[in-house]
Image (cartoon, rainbow, N blue to C red):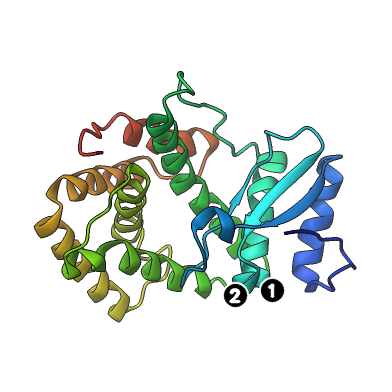
């Protein structure tokens, strides 16, 4: 299923319409929205979306769950394009051997972890977006990644393990930036305890990801690439 969004077609909020118009002025490509659920195996309790500005010559495909496509979620994905076109925030690097899917996926996930922070920063600078949704989604994603260990389950793919490491690293490294509440921090602490007990190798990688975010930040184009480089250099031999 696909959708086309125009500044009037789906009657988006003013802030979202303005962002879309700015993206439209920066590129001749048409923005298309696609349903992400077929790629993710169904509905999830939190937003999982992605934007691809480079693979298609004529369109910018944005994948999201229509059931969770709030103005903030759509704005977040449009802001990925905006930060690339207007600020130059895009890590164009890729793993040298694209046939190596696990390593290519690892690089993409780490790059996304950093660029999401840049996007949220820019959304906070605009009036009209309720960025509290990203706090909730951050915590919900960490819960979904880690609590299955307590039920005797485990991640069976490298993707699941890498996403789990990212979901622990970001709230550990940037609790104030995501405006975590006291109860959120308690939840994250408990999730770290579970991960260290059940999957210490994944916890170790998550700690290195968090260290890279703390050390290098993301406030400059150079800075946004540094944590990706540092995190990608960490051994990922825990991947099955």
**Quarter of the rendering occupied by the C terminus:** top left
Q: Residues within 10 Å of mark 2 (few under 14, many from 20)?
A: few
Residue tagged 2: 130
Task: Give the residue drawn at x 25%, y 74%.
Answer: 187
- Residue at 47% x, 38% y: name it: 108
- Quadrant of the frame with the N terminus: bottom right
Q: Position of residue 100 (x, y in %)?
A: 41, 25
CA separation, marks 2 and 1?
7 Å
Q: Picture coordinates of residue 3 (x, y %)?
A: 78, 60
* Image coordinates for residue 210, horizontal then vertical, percent: 29, 48
| Image location of residue 37, percent across then percent down | 57, 61
Identify the residue at horizontal 65%, vertical 68% (top origin).
66
Secondary structure found at label 2: loop
Q: Residue furthest bottom?
A: 183
Quarter residue 172 falls in: bottom left
14 with respect to 129 (left or right): right
Quadrant housing residue 229: top left
Q: Is residue 222 above or below residue 208?
A: above
Q: Residue furthest right?
A: 8
Mark 1 residue element: loop
Q: Which residue is mark 1?
A: 128
Residue beneath the point at 28% across and 49% down: 156
Q: Residues within 10 Å of mark 1 (few under 14, many from 20)?
A: some
Toward the viewer: 176 or 2?
2
Q: Is 63 on the left or on the right of 177, as rendered?
A: right
Task: Give left or right: position of 89 versus 229.
Answer: right
Q: Are marks 2 and 1 in contact (CB under 8 Å)?
A: no
- Report the label total: 2
Q: Which mark is residue 205?
A: none
In this rendering, position of residue 46 left or right of residue 148: right
Q: Is residue 89 above or below residue 82?
A: above
Residue at the farthest top position: 96
């Amino acid at each position: 299923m696909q959708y086309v969004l125009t500044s009037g077609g789906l009657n988006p909020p003013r802030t979202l319409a303005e962002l879309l118009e700015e993206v439209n002025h920066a590129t001749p490509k048409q923005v298309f929205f696609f349903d992400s659920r077929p790629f993710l195996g169904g509905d999830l309790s939190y937003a999982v979306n992605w934007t691809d500005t480079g693979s298609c010559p004529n369109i910018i495909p944005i994948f999201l769950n229509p059931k969770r496509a709030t103005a903030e979620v759509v704005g977040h994905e449009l802001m990925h394009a905006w930060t690339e076109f207007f600020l130059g925030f895009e890590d164009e690097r890729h793993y040298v051997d694209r046939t190596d899917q696990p390593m290519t996926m690892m690089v993409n996930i780490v790059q996304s972890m950093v660029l999401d922070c840049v996007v949220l920063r820019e959304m906070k600078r605009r009036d009209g977006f309720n960025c509290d949704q990203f706090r909730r989604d951050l915590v919900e994603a960490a819960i979904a990644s880690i609590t299955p260990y307590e039920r005797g389950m485990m991640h069976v793919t490298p993707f699941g393990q890498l996403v789990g490491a990212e979901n622990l690293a970001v709230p550990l490294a940037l609790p104030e930036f995501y405006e975590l509440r006291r109860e959120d921090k308690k939840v994250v602490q408990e999730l770290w305890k579970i991960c260290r007990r059940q999957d210490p190798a994944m916890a170790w990688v998550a700690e290195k990801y968090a260290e890279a975010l703390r050390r290098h930040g993301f406030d400059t184009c150079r800075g946004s690439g540094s944590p990706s480089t540092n995190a990608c250099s960490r051994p990922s031999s825990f991947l099955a």
